[in-house]
Image (cartoon, grey):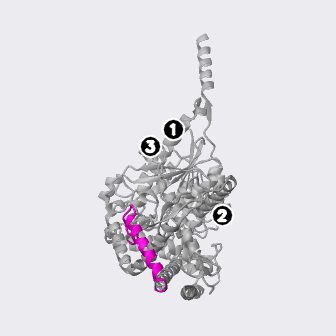
């Protein structure tokens, strides 16, 4: 009778799961189909999506892809549980600090998206607590139902789990090979984006709920049909739980522990490891990507003159006398320079060409890294492009100079060498968008203040600075920023997603946009309309790991206001503080400095690269930089490619990468003189002078 009931319940459970899954599937298929129709109606679809590889450009009613925990359309709940526990182990917290911990400036850690992610303001914590409270009340019945079978299952596992010992040397070597393959699988698992989308989470939650409900029904049927055995199990569990050392009831535990043992271990005694439901978001850091691809990694904490804490990351080649500094643009991070992997990323290409690679990160993270731990949101986001060019970049370049000078000076092979110009290395800079405007500001202001900028060449990919030729969308944003600045500045100091829940939602939606091509294409088209029709893969960029639930790049309202001021004036100028008196106090003149008038101070070669399909910073605006530089006798070059704005960093284009590397190779390492030869020449000169 018991077997008959079990079979009936099993068939019913699978039928219910299949029905609910197909219902969700049909709903998503309907949404995907409506998106396909809208995508076909909207103008400009072909031009927007033509540069995105792997996307279905024609409208389709194709059903969505199966979740990762479904195999051939059949639910594999046990496989999901295994993957979930493996993911929990592989995503455990790692100590990112290395090197000398006492050295406060040379602290090595992960990325600006990891260490800073745990410092939230009181407002963020309060908002997160409210959301958790709300969801806990909504999900309380399901949580209560889930705890009963989990506790019963845990007690049965504790009482009945035994692990056999290894019988011999041959079997032991076999187990060690198993362990090697398991570790290898874990590495592949970590390097692959295995996040679940929102739809997959809904399907998974439904399946977990159905499993829990039928488990309760199965236990009830078992108690009804075999009351003596059930009471015996309950009796042993009751006294076993009271005799346990922890003294906690399994129902009250938030994270249950499962006894496990890894094959091939010397001591196969079961050990407890926490089992909890992972949110499965992609929160890989720049360090994760670099090290998992087999490259070395290092990071430095850099503190600016106004107290902002930046992360300068590095793919180190300490003996190299050629270094390159890569600086990202707005709403980006160092992840953009490595996002295409080994083959198509500028950072890896430069390292393979013998360069010591440094990846800069601007201020502007949700976690608000600052020496003042209690800094308010309004104070933190009060900065413009001025601070990027006059505080962030100088701090990072001085750190590069300090590190390279120290390493090359202490290099045993170079103890008897001297450099002609006193700088034992050559430093080039590759900058994109806002980073290009900031590096130009840095060089000009350094020359005005008669300070060394330490750079040998600039490669600027679609640099910001001039914006008077822009789309209607940007013109509208400009007028709104300038008109509503007195109201928006105190109310909206920074543009970012403030809570972990909504950042997690965005991270998961990026996976849904990839899984459902028509929906993703519709979102891609609408986003491109918002930025003037630019055909960059905006949805693909949202899928990058730096847009995760822990932290995320943001943008200050004053940076947006600064760009609006440049567009209105038609000049590449510094921030206008709103009154002649305020400008006089900062610049010594009633108006902000027009940086274009000081291009004659640029004393290094500059390579300008523009995109013909770039509607964010049009090629005509990059040409304006070029014309002013040529008029000021700057050694400048100009090149155009058939690219959109994000193609310069996010997309893999061999032609662009080859061009950038060719410009880098034009910089030769500093000429070296042998110290002993120099001393010998001086002695001969002195000897000749004395005999004469």
Task: Please state if 88 lies on the left or on the right of 580 as rendered.
Answer: right
Q: Which mark is residue 617?
A: none
Q: Marks 3/1: CA distance?
A: 24 Å
Q: Residue at x 38, y 49 (%)?
A: 305
> How many discs appear?
3
Image location (x, y in percent) of residue 22: 57, 87
Residue 590 location, quadrant: bottom left
Labels 3 and 2: the sequence-earlier one = 3
Q: Can residue 226 be found in the magenta stretch?
A: yes
Labels 3 and 1: the sequence-earlier one = 1
**SS assignment at label 2:** loop
The secondary structure making up most of the magenta span is helix
User: Which callout, 3 or 1, points to the residue nearer the camera?
Assistant: 1
* The one of 368 and 41 positioned closer to us in this rendering: 368
- Residue highlighted by disc 1: 406
Label 3 crowd (10 A; few <14 / some 14-19 / many >=20) = few
Image location (x, y in percent) of residue 16: 54, 88
Q: Residue at x 59, y 27 (%)?
A: 675
Q: Marks 3/2: CA distance?
A: 39 Å
Residue 577 in view here = yes
Q: Which mark is residue 653?
A: 2
Label 2 crowd (10 A; few <14 / some 14-19 / many >=20) = some
* The one of 138 and 593 positioned closer to us in this rendering: 138
Task: Please state if 58 lies on the left or on the right of 98 as rendered.
Answer: right
User: Which callout, 3 or 2, points to the residue nearer the camera?
Assistant: 2
Q: Residue at x 46, y 86 (%)?
A: 224
Q: In the rendered view, would you say 409 is above or below 516?
A: above
Q: Are marks 2 and 1 in contact (CB under 8 Å)?
A: no
Q: Marks 2/1: CA distance?
A: 36 Å
Magenta part of the chain = 224-251
**SS assignment at label 3:** loop
- Residue highlighted by disc 3: 450
């Amino acid at each position: 009778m018991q077997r008959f009931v079990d079979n009936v319940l099993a068939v019913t459970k699978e039928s219910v799961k299949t029905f609910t899954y197909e219902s969700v599937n049909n709903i998503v298929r309907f949404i995907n189909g409506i998106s396909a129709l809208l995508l076909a109606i909207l103008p400009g679809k072909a031009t927007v999506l033509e540069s995105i590889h792997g996307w279905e450009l024609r409208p389709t009613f194709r059903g969505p892809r199966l979740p990762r925990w479904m195999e051939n359309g059949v639910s594999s709940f046990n496989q999901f549980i295994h993957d979930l526990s493996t993911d929990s182990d592989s995503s455990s917290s790692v100590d990112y600090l290395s090197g000398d911990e006492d050295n406060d400036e040379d602290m090595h850690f992960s990325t600006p998206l990891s260490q800073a992610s745990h410092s939230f303001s009181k407002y963020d914590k309060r908002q997160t607590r409210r959301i958790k409270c709300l969801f806990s009340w909504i999900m309380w019945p399901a949580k209560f139902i889930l705890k009963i079978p989990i506790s019963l299952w845990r007690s049965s596992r504790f009482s009945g789990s035994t692990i056999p010992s290894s019988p011999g040397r041959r079997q032991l070597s076999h187990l060690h090979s198993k362990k090697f393959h398991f570790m290898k699988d874990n590495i592949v698992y970590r390097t692959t984006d295995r996040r679940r989308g929102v739809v997959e989470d809904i399907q998974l939650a439904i399946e977990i709920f159905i499993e829990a409900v039928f488990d309760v029904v199965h236990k009830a049927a078992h108690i009804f049909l075999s009351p003596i055995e059930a009471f015996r199990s309950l009796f042993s569990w009751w006294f076993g739980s009271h005799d346990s050392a922890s003294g906690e009831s399994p129902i009250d535990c938030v994270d249950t522990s499962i006894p496990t043992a890894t094959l091939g271990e010397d001591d196969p005694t079961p050990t407890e490891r926490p089992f909890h439901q992972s949110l499965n978001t992609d929160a890989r850091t720049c360090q994760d990507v670099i090290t998992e691809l087999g490259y070395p990694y290092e990071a430095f904490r850099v503190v600016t003159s106004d107290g902002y804490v930046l992360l300068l990351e590095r793919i180190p080649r300490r003996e190299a006398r050629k270094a390159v500094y890569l600086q990202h643009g707005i709403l980006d991070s160092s992840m953009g320079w490595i996002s295409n992997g080994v083959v198509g990323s500028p950072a890896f290409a430069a390292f393979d060409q013998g360069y010591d690679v440094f990846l800069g990160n601007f201020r502007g993270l949700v976690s608000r890294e600052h020496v003042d731990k209690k800094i308010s949101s309004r104070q933190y986001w009060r900065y413009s492009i001025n601070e990027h060019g006059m505080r962030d970049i100088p701090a990072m370049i001085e750190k590069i100079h300090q590190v390279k000078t120290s390493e090359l000076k202490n290099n045993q092979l170079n103890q008897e060498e001297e450099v002609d110009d006193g700088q034992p290395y050559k430093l080039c800079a590759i900058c994109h968008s806002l980073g290009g405007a900031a590096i130009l500001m840095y060089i000009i202001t350094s020359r005005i203040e008669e300070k060394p900028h330490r750079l040998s060449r600039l490669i600027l990919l679609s640099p910001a600075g001039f914006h008077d030729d822009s789309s209607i969308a940007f013109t509208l944003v400009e007028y709104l920023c300038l008109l509503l600045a007195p109201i928006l500045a105190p109310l909206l100091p920074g543009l970012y997603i403030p809570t972990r829940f909504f950042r997690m939602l965005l991270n998961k939606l990026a996976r849904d946009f990839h899984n459902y091509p028509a929906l993703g294409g519709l979102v891609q088209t609408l986003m491109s309309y918002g930025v003037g029709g630019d055909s960059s893969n905006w949805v693909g960029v949202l899928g990058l790991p730096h847009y995760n639930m822990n932290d995320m790049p943001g943008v200050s309202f004053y940076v947006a206001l600064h760009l609006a001021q440049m567009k209105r004036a038609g000049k590449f100028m510094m921030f206008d503080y709103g009154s002649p008196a305020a400008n006089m106090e900062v610049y010594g003149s009633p108006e902000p400095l027009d940086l274009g008038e000081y291009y004659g101070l640029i004393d290094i070669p500059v390579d300008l690269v523009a995109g013909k399909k770039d509607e964010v910073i049009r090629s005509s605006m990059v040409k304006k930089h070029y014309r002013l530089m040529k008029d000021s006798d700057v050694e400048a070059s100009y090149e155009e490619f058939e690219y959109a704005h994000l193609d310069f960093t996010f997309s893999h284009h061999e032609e662009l990468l080859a061009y950038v590397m060719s410009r880098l190779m034009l910089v030769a390492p500093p000429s070296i003189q042998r110290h002993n030869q120099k001393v010998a020449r001086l002695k001969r000169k002195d000897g000749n002078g004395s005999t004469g």
